[in-house]
Image (spheres, rainbow, N blue to C red):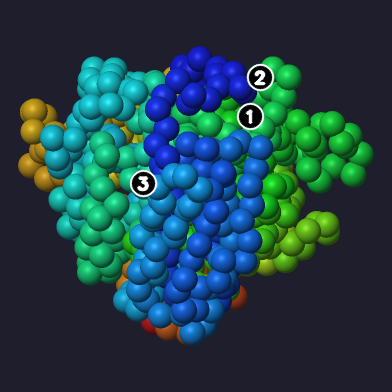
Amino acid sequence: MKRVFAIVIIFLTFTQTISAQKLADLERVEPSFWWVGFKNHQLQLIVHGNEISQREVQIDYSGVSLKSVEKVENPNYMFLNLLISDDAQPGKFDIIFSLKGKKNLIYSYQLKARNKGTLAQGVTDKDLIYLIMPDRFANGNYSNDKISGLKDQTFSRDSMYYRHGGDIQGIIDHLDYLKDLGATALWLTPVQENDEFKTSYHGYANTENYKIDPRYGTNELYKKLVEDAHQKEMKIVMDVVPNHVGSQHWTVLDKPFKDWVHQWPSFTRTTYKDQTLFDPHASAADKKLMQNGWFDYHMPDMNQENQMVANYIEQSYIFWIEYAGVDGFRIDTYPYNNLEFMAHWQKRVKDEYPNFTLYGETYVHGMANQAYFTQGKTVNQKIDTELPATTDFQVHFSLLDALNQKFGWTEGVNELYTVLASDYLYQDAYRNVIFLDNHDITRFYSGVGEDFTKFKSGLAMLLTLRGVPQIYYGTELAMPGVNNPDGLLRADFLGGWKADQTNKFTSSGRTSKENEAFNYIKTLANYRKNTPALQTGKMMQYVPVDGIYVYFRYDNDKTVMVIYNGNDEVKNLDLKRFDERTNGFTGAKEITNGKLLGGFTTIVLPARTAYVYELTK
């Protein structure tokens, strides 16, 4: 998530409640249902209703014990601590809330059998992730464009900050397009309900944890998206935001207790200074401000140190794995969370779903800074964060510099070489998600000055380097967009709306340059999909000389050689230097154009051009 949003939402006071609204005697129970068979037998239900804490609670169901009832300072809440034994069977039972002189309140609770289908497959270095902002991709259901009763009614495609109508059905309708491109996993920016007053389209200030935003669809439709994607051999990554919620979240409007979210005398923003978390000389005040300050006016910071808050967050995300069968989480604003809490939550997820993937957004600067947030205590961390991987901003920064900067001792391709030489800092750098752009930073095509040669070279390296590559929707069309303001990065994918005059989902609707970009990515992506050497194969890189960077990806079956000329002029490259990896090969085939390299002695390299060669004997 970008650090500061362009539009500031009116800051709501800490003491705001929903007292002006009529609260039902039993407003809600969350999670509204659960499953038997988890390794963790504990379940905490959060119950909300008018003066609900005055009532006594009864449960009578074999295998389910009510261990305790926790009542908090707000009488509209109680927390029920249940123990679900291994012997518990799927079924329904009543939770009875009684009060002398009052009619009993009854909630019918259901325990379901666990999902035994394909779920939690995990996203690995075999995959290519395609990032979608649902509101801007395709409108498959025009009836849900505006929903009565929700606060944000600003629907207009003419404004970059209003809702545009894209939804889950629109994504389902274009799964074949994404499969054809070569995507094997889809990452959707948050889809839980975001009932904020303005700029609610981005989703990063959710107001519900267990409900899909009705402007995107329903819980059932989201589950169908996962099932349909799995049938087409694609996975789904859910974007989750444990650090904060929206200011209109129901638990913020009527807090269970004052420090449900971190409290300050007045609005206090985080410093965004990740260094304070590992700086041996940092003050406690600076560390507190970094982790407990609010990310923005309308994003209250969750008090993850409180066990009830921690339970609420953990259970809500485990719910989506089991209910919908998602394959991984991209964790937003990772450094701003309490790392002890994150370690516990992620370990709990891995205990239940060993193949599940978690990777955190670490928008930081410096290899050690980024590695600090990953698991294994590889850089002398005081805590094992349990985070398998990050969004690799260091590779992102260095790729752009390799494409744009002149060659120098630490500049240009030397920076990329240095970053990858620091992979020893990670437990496994191959798990990191590498990218050229996303929804928070300047689109890649604009980032290289709309230079089409640089554009293709960057993609060639992205799809052949170690790690899990991710591309942003529209990159396959060389879509431009500068991050000032961020709404410019989030244009609609033309063809996703009935009113669009052109349809970029089809070759006939694209310009010749757009088709060239699409076909270039499609060729490399599908080659990568069928080439284990580019997925799990080893990597060997050579120190850049004269501005030329060469690396290999290889296994026992195949060797791929990637050459990039990071100069603004033509260069000749003598291939003899690379005998260590090329010995025994007599030729090579360039993957993107099919041309053969005969003789295997020298090669002429146009300026800023990258080649991807499969070596042949």
Where does the image place residue 197, in percent across and percent down from the top left?
A: 39, 21
Q: Is residue 272 left or right of residue 198?
A: right
Residue at 63 percent across and 29 percent down: it is 294
Q: Is residue 5 left or right of residue 594?
A: right
User: Residue 211 got which mark?
Assistant: 3
Determine the residue located farthest toward the front in the rendered image: 101
Label 2 belongs to which residue? 267
In this rendering, the label closer to the viewer, 3 or 1: 3
490 vs 8: above or below: below
The amino acid sitting under disc 2 is: Phe
Q: Residues within 10 Å of mark 1 (few under 14, many from 20)?
A: many
Give the image quarter of residue 206.
top left
Residue at 62 percent across and 66 percent down: it is 67
Query: Disc 2, disc 1: CB below 8 Å?
Result: yes
The amino acid sitting under disc 3 is: Lys
Q: Secondary structure at mark 2?
A: loop
Q: Is residue 118 left or right of residue 14?
A: left
Cα separation, mark 3 vs mark 1, equals: 24 Å
